[in-house]
Amino acid sequence: METIGTKNFDIMFFMNSISLKREFLYFDKFIYNEQCLNESKDLGEFFSKSICDQSGKLFKKNMDEIEMLEKRGLLAPFKTISINSQNQCIELHRNPSFKKIVTNIMDNENNRNKCFGNIKSQGKKQFYDNFTTVLKTGTQLSDNYSLLSSLLMNSIGETTIPTLQLRSSLKQTLDFKTSINTVVERFPIIDDDISWEKLFEYKEDSEAKTKLSALKLFANDLSKSEYTFSEVEDKLNHLMNEYENQIKLHKLKVKYHKYDVLLTSTLGVIENAIKLNFTEIGKNHLSLKKEKVDLLLAERNIGGKEIAYIVDTTDLFRQKK
């Protein structure tokens, strides 16, 4: 089953070179709000070209990424939800989360519009404060649209997870979306030199799929626990350190053991070749293959293996930079 997230683009997205690749290490597809994108795109283009990159290459790179993902069917606009019954409509409007998100969206839009007015009337003196507030409220608005889209889709049985940019958008008490966002934060920010094709190829690897599946189960179990937000972060840190340390120690042991097997096998191959003992030659090669199998089996028993996908991914893409 696909893991679908709701994701929206704020002004800051168009002012930075950070790709969406990190989120796609966990998710398979994203749903976004067209109105939010269009508003952020216009302002993002203006500020990106005025402040960050006058050539417009940065803005174009980000737009090209969005368009590429849409063509691949990995990014799609949110479609209006049809509520067929009056009871369903009443239930939705009584939902405290729904009311809170809608109120937050209205407040975000009012604050942003007020700051725009201040920028025009107050001039350069208060520009920085107003500009910073515009950026911050734009990100809050983006997060709230992600929360709203996810809530509406989940209400009709389409399971989605909102991806959020601000810690303030997450509950301090743990729930499913907080658990997933906390886990996704641990993935590396992937360099532009790493192509999307490399990322897609990596996600199709059978071992990576197995480890990602284990990570998703772990994140789901976390959301059902009684951990606080900070306790989950501590647990992730502990597991990642435990896994990294044990995998380093294990590979070091295997390295020396494999050298011993390789030396023995090489001498055996030479000796058996002279004697034309092809059965023994085959046994020596099988012992080398066994070493690889032993390494894989041992990794399954290492502590912290629940987050192996994060550690392996970080190591892989760090090496490819």
Image (spheres, rainbow, N blue to C red):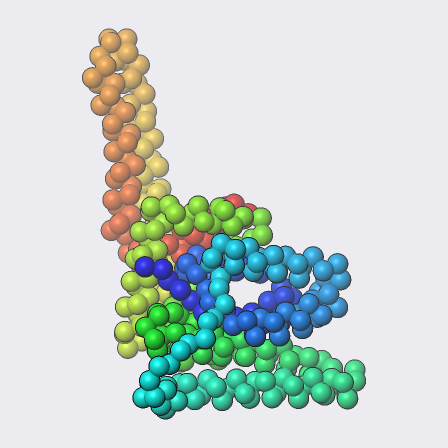
Image point 26% across, 50% down: which residue? 300
Farthest residue, direction left:
279
Compared to residue 17, the image places residue 300 above or below, namely above
Q: Picture coordinates of residue 107 (x, y %)?
A: 55, 88
The quarter holding residue 118 reads: bottom right
- The answer to whether residue 35 is left or right of residue 118 is left
Q: Picture coordinates of residue 193 (x, y %)?
A: 58, 48
Instruction: Count all numbered tags in the image, as a single digit.
Output: 0
Q: Nearer the viewer, residue 249 or 216?
A: 216
Compared to residue 232, the image places residue 207 above or below, namely above
Q: Quadrant of the N terminus?
A: bottom left
Image point 63% across, 57% down: which residue? 61
Image point 59% across, 78% down: which residue? 138
Compared to residue 147, the image places residue 86 above or below, namely below
Compared to residue 290, the image places residue 162 above or below, namely below
Residue 182 seen anywhere in this rendered image of the structure: no
Q: Picture coordinates of residue 272 (x, y %)?
A: 25, 13
Q: Picture coordinates of residue 234 (x, y %)?
A: 37, 69
- The answer to whether residue 111 is left or right of residue 229 is right
Image point 33% across, 53% down: which residue? 211
Residue 267 seen anywhere in this rendered image of the structure: yes
